Image (cartoon, rainbow, N blue to C red):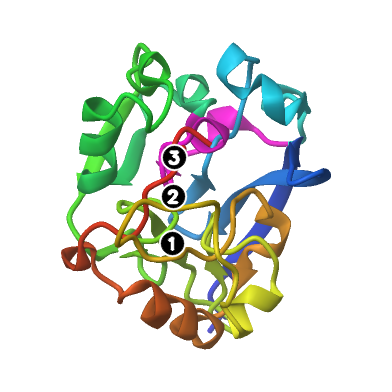
């Protein structure tokens, strides 16, 4: 009997941004699964005045060694511009996002660039809490960076997790003490600012402390931070 094909996760560098005085890489992740090819986040594909202070240097996704026509499923960890700016390139593909995140993107002016959310042909699939995306990979809510953030538990090998902006640096997954920019009264601190996607493939046991610190796995814990949300 042939062994089942392995599930692989490949980071793809698509930009770097200026964050807290340093250049930080931005990656999307391709999950190759025997039943489908999944793209986690789509990054920025064009510049916009609202992100000018991050001085984005783009590496177009269309110029990468990624066959966009071969992508079957898209996942947005959240809807900030550096995570879903290329959704229009995958028009017609099911794009899974937490319902809370989609609602906030439509209703809150400072959450993201709203005109980019509903690009022509983008087909969102709202997710409520956990979802088995494919046999093995599943989506888990991870409120903190935004109340509607989710992560992808890949479910292979050491069960890596594509964690988006749950943390900035890998050390924060072990000791999540970093506070974000000044938060609103009563808001919880969050695990960093954003953008270290290359370092955001972790394992569940390393994320447990972060999620406990942020208030749990489920969006039922409510609002976790107030901040300049479009990043």
- Which of disc 2 and disc 3 is earlier in sequence? 3
Disc number for residue 77: 2
Tell me: residue 106, above or below residue 32: above
What secondary structure is found at the residue carrying circle 3? loop
Q: Around disc 1, counting alpha carbons within 10 Å, would you say few (fewer than 14), some (14 to 19), or many (20 or more)?
A: many
Q: Spatial distance from mark 1 to mark 3, Cα to Cα?
A: 18 Å
Along the horizontal axis of the image, is 119 left or right of 223?
right
Q: Which residue is mark 1?
A: 151
Q: Residue at x 43, y 56 (%)?
A: 35
Q: Relative to the observer, which residue lies in front, 74 or 227? A: 227
The image position of residue 117, as x and y in percent, is 37, 23
Q: Around disc 3, counting alpha carbons within 10 Å, would you say few (fewer than 14), some (14 to 19), or many (20 or more)?
A: some
- The span shown in magenta is 66-84
Q: Which residue is mark 3?
A: 72
What secondary structure is found at the residue carrying circle 2? loop
- Which of disc 3 and disc 1 is earlier in sequence? 3
What secondary structure is found at the residue carrying circle 1? strand
Q: Residue at x 52, y 21 (%)?
A: 89
- Which of disc 2 and disc 1 is earlier in sequence? 2
The image position of residue 96, as x and y in percent, is 32, 44
Q: Spatial distance from mark 3 to mark 2, Cα to Cα?
A: 17 Å
The image position of residue 193, as x and y in percent, is 59, 52
The part of the image, by quadrant, that contains residue 201 is bottom right
Q: Relative to the observer, which residue lies in front, 131 or 204? A: 204
Given the current orientation, which residue lies at the most extreme front position? Answer: 185
């Amino acid at each position: 009997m042939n062994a089942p094909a392995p599930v692989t996760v490949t980071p793809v560098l698509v930009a770097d941004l200026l964050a807290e005085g340093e250049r930080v890489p931005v990656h999307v992740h391709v999950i190759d699964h025997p039943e489908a090819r999944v793209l986690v986040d789509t990054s920025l594909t064009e510049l916009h005045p609202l992100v000018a202070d991050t001085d984005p240097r783009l590496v177009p996704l269309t110029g990468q060694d990624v066959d966009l026509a071969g992508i079957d499923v898209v996942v947005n960890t959240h809807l900030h511009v550096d995570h879903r700016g290329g959704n229009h390139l995958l028009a017609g593909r099911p794009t899974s996002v937490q319902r809370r995140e989609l609602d906030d993107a439509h209703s809150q002016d400072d959450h993201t660039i709203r005109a980019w959310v509903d690009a022509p042909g983008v087909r969102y699939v709202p997710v409520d809490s956990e979802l088995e995306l494919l046999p093995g990979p599943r989506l888990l809510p991870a409120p903190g960076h935004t109340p509607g953030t989710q992560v992808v538990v890949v479910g292979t090998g050491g069960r890596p997790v594509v964690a988006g902006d749950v943390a900035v640096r890998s050390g924060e997954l072990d000791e999540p003490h970093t506070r974000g920019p000044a938060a609103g009264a009563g808001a919880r601190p969050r695990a960093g600012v954003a953008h270290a996607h290359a370092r955001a493939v972790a394992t569940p046991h390393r994320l447990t402390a972060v999620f406990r610190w942020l208030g749990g796995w489920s969006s039922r814990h409510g609002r976790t931070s107030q901040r300049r949300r479009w990043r």
